[in-house]
Amino acid sequence: MSIVNFVKGGPMPTPDRTSLAEIVDAGRSIVAESGIAGLTMQRVAASVGVRAPSLYKRVRSRDDLVRLVIEAEALELGRRLDPIAERADIDARTALSDLATTTRGYAHSRPVAFGLILAPPHAGEAPDRDVLARASAPLLRIAGELAGKEHALTAARTLTAWMNGFIMMELAGAFRLGGDLEQAWELGLAWIADAVDRRGASTERASGW
Amino acid sequence: MSIVNFVKGGPMPTPDRTSLAEIVDAGRSIVAESGIAGLTMQRVAASVGVRAPSLYKRVRSRDDLVRLVIEAEALELGRRLDPIAERADIDARTALSDLATTTRGYAHSRPVAFGLILAPPHAGEAPDRDVLARASAPLLRIAGELAGKEHALTAARTLTAWMNGFIMMELAGAFRLGGDLEQAWELGLAWIADAVDRRGASTERASGW
DNA sequence: ACCTGAACACCGTTCAAGT
DNA sequence: ACCTGAACACCGTTCAAGT
């Protein structure tokens, strides 16, 4: 088809010098390195070896690219969480702890990206709801096992709210009053899990009643 | 002094056409209306009746102005929370509920500002730690009453993490799987309060053990 | 069909010149 | 002492022109 056009004297085909995937990957690296403000079309273009105007062949706008970058990050987080919810050899309590720790580890390794997933700068850059649903499915499943089906959604919301809130405040440097942050994480997780767990509490203090 | 300069032929004084407070107020209005991206120096300048370069007599940079706006918002939130912690006629449990509801109400009325307090776009725009400490003091006090002095800090962190996480996800539109969001707030708050309350649980389910 | 330079309308910021 | 226009170095985005 392109040869036909060429022979006929139609528009000249040229081999693609980049791809959408390469552009999004470049965007992820730049965001991780320099923050969202560092993500300029010119820098992305330079990173993939073209000029800025060429990017508009693959993305609609900078906002569009930001959204794609956030979605790619959310999908990777989901990919890390999926196997935890699927393991059958651990109980819900352990699975919850693994999931929270994995999420926190991801947030620490990619703080900017995590912040963008949780709080996209503008509405136009918010990730697709299906992508977010995919990333939160594992927790919903574990919450169901822990709190029972009828309370699964409410329990999942309580758990995510605490977990994401803790991690976000930690990343924002809001916990500056001293004290042991690891203990706050561990104890907080145990408290929240106890609160949601219909089978009863299991932390030392609670069992001491 | 200015008259002396004038008489001597020194630099001519001119009456100030704006002030730092007016600039910060204009910034708050613009942020509330158009988001952080809408906060341009030109727009702020137009709003206070000068040209953009004149703003640099009062603020160091746009980032500096953004920080001042965030700090002003954090101080206002703190001003709303202070009286709750000081009331002696209500118990800690009720105070916690009032504080959480007031915070949520502030977040709903000023969603952009609340997001900025929790997750400032860049490090340079993060509010001063004293300002944040002021805003979190009421919760710390209530947490102390609820969980006991030795667990006050950890309890406060658990409570803020849940509260801010819930509100932030709500603002970001992350709770899209249906269900009753008000119930999730009420029940979540009760669960968390129970978890932190050393005096024992008080929700229906917990007391049903 | 893709890529590019040039251009446009915006930014933040600086600075000499006005009063 | 404050304010301003002009200028500079950046942006995102468009588009006619190249191949």
Image (cartoon, coloured by chain):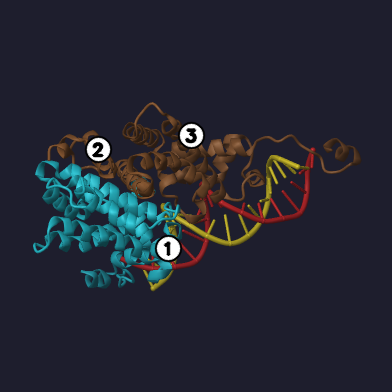
Chain colours: A cyan, B brown, C red, D yellow
Q: Element type at marker 2?
A: helix
The N terminus of chain A sits in image quarter: bottom left
Task: Name the front one of labels 2 and 3.
Answer: 2
Task: Output the chain of dot 1.
Answer: A
Judge depth for marks 2 and 1 and give the one in front. 2
x and y, in percent, of residue A162 in the image: 29, 48
Residue with the mark numbered 1: A52
Q: Do marks 2 and 1 both belong to one polypeptide chain?
A: no
Frontmost residue, B142 versus B110: B142
Amino acid, disc 1:
Ala
- Foreground: B155 or B107? B155
Mark 2 crowd level (few <14, some 14–19, many ≥20, 10 Å Cα): some
State the separation of the CA atoms marked 3 and 1: 47 Å
Q: Is residue A187 above or below residue A33?
A: above
Label 1 element class: helix
Q: Residue furthest top?
A: B89
- Within 10 Å of the Cα at label 3, are there few (<14), some (14-19), or many (20+) other Cα atoms? some
Q: Amino acid at mark 2?
A: Ala
Q: Residue furthest front?
A: A208
From the viewer's side, name the closer residue of A164 and B149.
B149
Residue tagged by mark 2?
A: B190
The residue to which callout 3 is attached is B79
